[in-house]
């Protein structure tokens, strides 16, 4: 089982106790849906149940790929489920990928959870995927918290697609952030976890 430890937050593999909590947070009335890609269709009940069924089958066998495609964000002290980290290929042919982060509970926003999670995840991907030279993070101009988080970890704005997203009938810009491997290594020469212990 993978566990990546921060100060108050950790990244780990799924456990069965996560599934009921996750299923509830995936319901469409929760606030996080208004910020995490609100221009995309929300998952259907059938889609969520399919994810839960797949996880319920895989968790007992620890049947997860290496590197992980997704890890749970959890409270370090209680192991409570907080959200997920993920990644996906933009172009597998050129080893170009993007990361995703969701912390579901608004009560956990603004507490440094995202900073720890994104930093630990970025370091994990650079370490386990030696062929990649960059990480991307995609968001939109209405998600100010994600913009601040990306910049705090060291990602820099690289692309602005003007009026590319529509939320509640209003146009917003699509934004692309990125960090290069050499920028990461310069910013965190002893590793991200070591930086956390210094803060």
Image (spheres, helix red, strand yellow):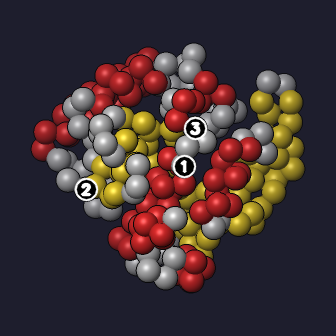
Q: Is residue 50 above or below residue 82?
A: above
The answer to whether 11 appears left or right of 173 in the picture is left
Report x, y in % for residue 72: 36, 44
SS class of the residue under badge 2?
loop
Of callouts 2 and 1, the N-terminal one: 2
Using the image as rendered, state which of residue 75 and residue 104 is in the foreground. Answer: 75
Q: Residue at x 51, y 25 (%)?
A: 43
Residue at the left extreme, as displayed: 61
Report the disc number at residue 2: 2
Q: Is residue 94 above or below residue 40?
A: below
Q: CA distance from mark 2 to mark 1?
A: 21 Å
Q: Residue at x 79, y 24 (%)?
A: 168
Report x, y in % for residue 112: 54, 49
Which residue is denoted by mark 3 in the rendering? 109
Question: Is mark 1 in CB contact (under 8 Å) with mark 3?
Answer: no
Report x, y in % for residue 118: 51, 56
Question: Is mark 2 in CB contact (under 8 Å) with mark 1?
Answer: no
The answer to whether 7 appears left or right of 119 in the picture is left
Which residue is denoted by mark 1 in the rendering? 112
The answer to whether residue 87 of the structure is visible from this angle is: no
The answer to whether residue 53 of the structure is visible from this angle is: yes
Q: Is residue 50 above or below residue 13?
A: above
Q: CA distance from mark 1 to mark 3?
A: 8 Å
Residue density around tag 2, few if under 14, some if 14–19, many if 20 or more, within 10 Å: few
Residue density around tag 3, few if under 14, some if 14–19, many if 20 or more, within 10 Å: few
Q: Residue at x 48, y 55 (%)?
A: 116
Look at discs 2 and 1 and give the one toward the viewer.
Answer: 1
């Amino acid at each position: 089982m993978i566990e990546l430890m921060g100060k108050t937050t950790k990244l780990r593999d799924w456990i069965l106790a996560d599934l009921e909590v996750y299923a509830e947070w995936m319901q469409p009335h929760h606030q996080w849906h208004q910020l995490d890609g609100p221009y995309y269709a929300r998952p259907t009940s059938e889609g969520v149940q399919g994810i839960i069924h797949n996880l319920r089958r895989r968790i007992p066998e620890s049947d997860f790929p290496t590197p992980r495609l997704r890890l749970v964000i959890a409270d370090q002290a209680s192991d409570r489920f907080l959200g997920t980290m993920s990644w996906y290929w933009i172009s597998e042919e050129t080893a170009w990928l993007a990361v995703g982060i969701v912390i579901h509970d608004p009560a956990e926003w603004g507490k440094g959870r995202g900073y720890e999670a994104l930093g630990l995840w970025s370091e994990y991907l650079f370490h386990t995927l030696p062929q990649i030279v960059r990480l991307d993070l995609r968001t939109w101009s209405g998600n100010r918290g994600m913009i601040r988080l990306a910049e705090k970890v060291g990602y820099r704005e690289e692309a602005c697609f003007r009026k590319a997203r529509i939320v509640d009938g209003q146009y917003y810009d699509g934004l692309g952030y990125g960090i290069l491997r050499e920028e990461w290594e310069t910013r965190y020469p002893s590793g991200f976890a070591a930086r956390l212990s210094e803060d």
